Amino acid sequence: MYQINFSNPIHIYFIGIGGISMSGLAEILLSEGFRISGSDRTPSPLTQTLTERGATVYYGQKEEHITTDIDLIVYTSAIRPDNPELSAAANLHIPTLTRAQLLGQMMKNYEVPIAVSGTHGKTTTTSMISEILLEHKADPTLSIGGIYKPIGGNIRVGSSGYFVTEACEYTNSFLSFFPKIGIILNIEEDHLDFFHDIQDIRNSFHQFAKLLPDNGALIINGDIDHLEEITGDLACRVITYGSSPDHDYHPTDITYDASGCPSFHLMRQNGKDDVFSLRVPGKHNVYNAVAAIALADLLSIPVKTTAGALLAYAGTDRRFEYKGEVNGITVIDDYAHHPTEITATLLAARELAHKTTWCVFQPHTYTRTKTFLNDFAKALSLADEIVLADIYAAREKDTLGISSRTLQAEIEKLGHRCHYFPTFSQIEAFLLENCTKGDLLITMGAGDVVKIGDDLLQK
């Protein structure tokens, strides 16, 4: 495998440079003196930022973009082997790395690389940790899977030994990493277009945990089933958190304010307890915060600093994000695209003062929709009114005979009314006609469903 050397900056070309993670890695390397170029399908704020900072970005992927002065090609798992730029790199014998392999190599450049993994909650927890480290003046380098307003994007280049990144299990990407501290928030079925089953997923998380060095640490949700299968053979320190007093950390006395934001007592095995309050809603965020607190304690950050940072943390884009109001209707957008995430979001919504909860859901990928069809129906039924958009295909093609009408029928089997419209404009017209003052409207999904709320707010 090709090894990059931070002491010897080279010319690196990114295929798919506009992705949230790829653009962040490119930005870090630009700051380290590397020459960066790359391609993507269309312009975006991320590619514009890269251009402003010195990168060369092409739109459209063409063989002629790959020139002999390029030293290394980086690509994502979404890039197919017959991609013209990847094929050109092979013909010119230019070495290649996957995005995950590059990120793993970059981790080696930092004294304390921290990787946040889990089926759900990675972006929120990584952002909470970022807020704490920034409040502590630790000057970290951050790579976040969403737009985090305090740093003006998804990336921050610091000058300390701290590097914080999300660690995604899809295609076993995180097995290319070199963390010193790892966090596992939860382990559930997902990405079954790649993994065989839940046991296959659990094995990947086990292998991720085994990447940690003997002098490293794993912070893990102790409520994960059969935890010993994940942690039993680890040489590193293991710190658990969760709902049981048997864990190293567990929250108690959870209460909510009028906005659905929780406060809680945090109990530690050492007998010390503290009170924390959050500005983001939902019980699931209590546990995300506890994981971040455990890390802060491990890094010897004062509790007062941690508590202040968590109280200041206002979330990231597309995570129960308040978008505005239209005709007295509150519009929220959320990235939830798995039944567990949908359940957490809709339960959080119940803590807000409002009349009717409207959920506009855009399923993400045919594989996920088919695999979790019944679970999606049950989770979405927590809303008062459900509106479905067409499935966002992402990397897939429609070969499974599944559609949003299939999900609509499953929801109606449960005795719950559900509406389906094939276009966003039809959904927007329906909502304007039927939502009333005091209602809560949540656009939900990992695709482009956010456009619906944005369009409504412009009317």
Image (cartoon, rainbow, N blue to C red):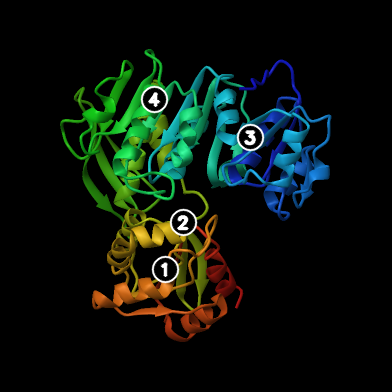
The quadrant the C terminus occupies is bottom right
Residue located at (35% from left, 47% from top): 285
The CA span between labels 3 and 1 is: 36 Å
Task: Count numbered badges in the picture.
Answer: 4
Residue 211 visible, this angle = yes
Residues packed near mark 2 inside 10 Å, few (<14), some (14 to 19) or many (20 plus): many
Which of the two discs, 2 and 3, labels the residue nearer the N terminus?
3
Circle 1/circle 4 CB separation < 8 Å? no
Q: Can you give x and y, in whole percent of width and height, for residue 383 in the image?
A: 32, 70
- Callout 4 amino acid: Pro
- Callout 1 amino acid: Ile
The CA span between labels 1 and 2 is: 21 Å
The quadrant the N terminus occupies is top right
The CA span between labels 4 and 3 is: 30 Å
Residue located at (36% from left, 26% from top): 209
Q: Which residue is mark 1?
A: 402
The CA span between labels 1 and 4 is: 51 Å
Foreground: 99 or 387? 99
In this rendering, which labeled residue sits more in front, label 4 or label 3? Answer: 3
Which of the two discs, 4 and 3, labels the residue nearer the N terminus?
3
Q: Which of the 4 quarters of the picture holds residue 85?
A: top right
Foreground: 367 or 324? 367
Q: Which residue is mark 4?
A: 302
The CA span between labels 2 and 3 is: 22 Å
Q: Which residue is mark 3?
A: 25
